[in-house]
Amino acid sequence: MKAILRMLLAALRGLLRFVLALLILFEEWGWAPLARVMARLGRLPVFRQLERWIGRVPPPLALLLLLAPTLLLLPVKLLALWLIAAGRAGYGLLLILVAKLLGTAIVARLFQLTRPALLQMPWFARLYARWTIWKTGLLNWVHASAAWRWARACKWRVRRALRRFT
């Protein structure tokens, strides 16, 4: 009985690890490009001043600024759920997608700007270090998997094939 329970827990742990890896890969895929887009916007005079101010805020305010987009987008996500419940699933899903992209872009840029202040808080620095180590291990696990190597090989084959036609 214990052996079956151990196998079941191991399978569940593997499934959870896989789902978390997919979520992290999705965030990583979108995080850097969206942060670059927001950094380009930050070159505009209005945003340049705002970014300078954000870069100088004290740690508690930096944390509040980082959490603000999540709180501000909550009503938008609730509106999207209402649209889905009202039979307008396409609009609801589109609104959730736009909110997710916009929220990720804003949080990515805010994190770049506030990271120095946030890391001044010992508890945040400890959690961030643990998160980084855990995430790196998880991504290394994904990158070492046969599925990842197969997908990368397919990607390179498609790229080579496309280059031949262009």
Image (spheres, helix red, strand yellow):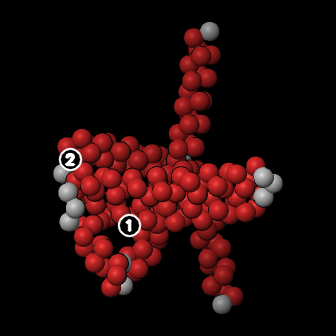
Residue position marked by numbered label 2 in the rendering: 121
Q: Secondary structure at mark 1?
A: helix
Three-letter amino acid code of the residue under disc 2: Met
Three-letter amino acid code of the residue under disc 1: Arg
- Residue 165 picture location, percent across and down: 69, 88
The residue under the point 42% across, 69% down is 35
Residue 153 in sight from this viewpoint: no
Q: Residues within 10 Å of mark 1 (few under 14, many from 20)?
A: many
Q: Residues within 10 Å of mark 2 (few under 14, many from 20)?
A: few
Q: Secondary structure at mark 2?
A: loop
In the image, residue 111 sits, relative to residue 162, either above or below, namely above
* Number of on-image labels: 2
Q: Quadrant of residue 62?
A: bottom left
Q: Is residue 144 left or right of residue 45?
A: right
The residue under the point 30% across, 72% down is 51
CB of mark 2 within 8 Å of CB of mark 1? no
Gap between marks 2 and 1, in whole Å? Answer: 19 Å
Q: Is residue 81 left or right of residue 74?
A: right
Return the residue nearer the eye: 20 or 72.
72
Q: Quadrant of residue 92?
A: bottom right
Residue 14 in sight from this viewpoint: yes
First-in-chain label (2 vs 1):
1
Quarter of the figure that contains the C terminus: bottom right
The residue under the point 26% across, 55% down is 61
- Residue 2 picture location, percent across and down: 57, 11
- Residue 34 picture location, percent across and down: 47, 70
| Residue 162, numbered circle | none
Residue position marked by numbered label 1 in the rendering: 109
Quarter of the figure that contains the N terminus: top right
Report the residue that reaches farthest toward the right: 87
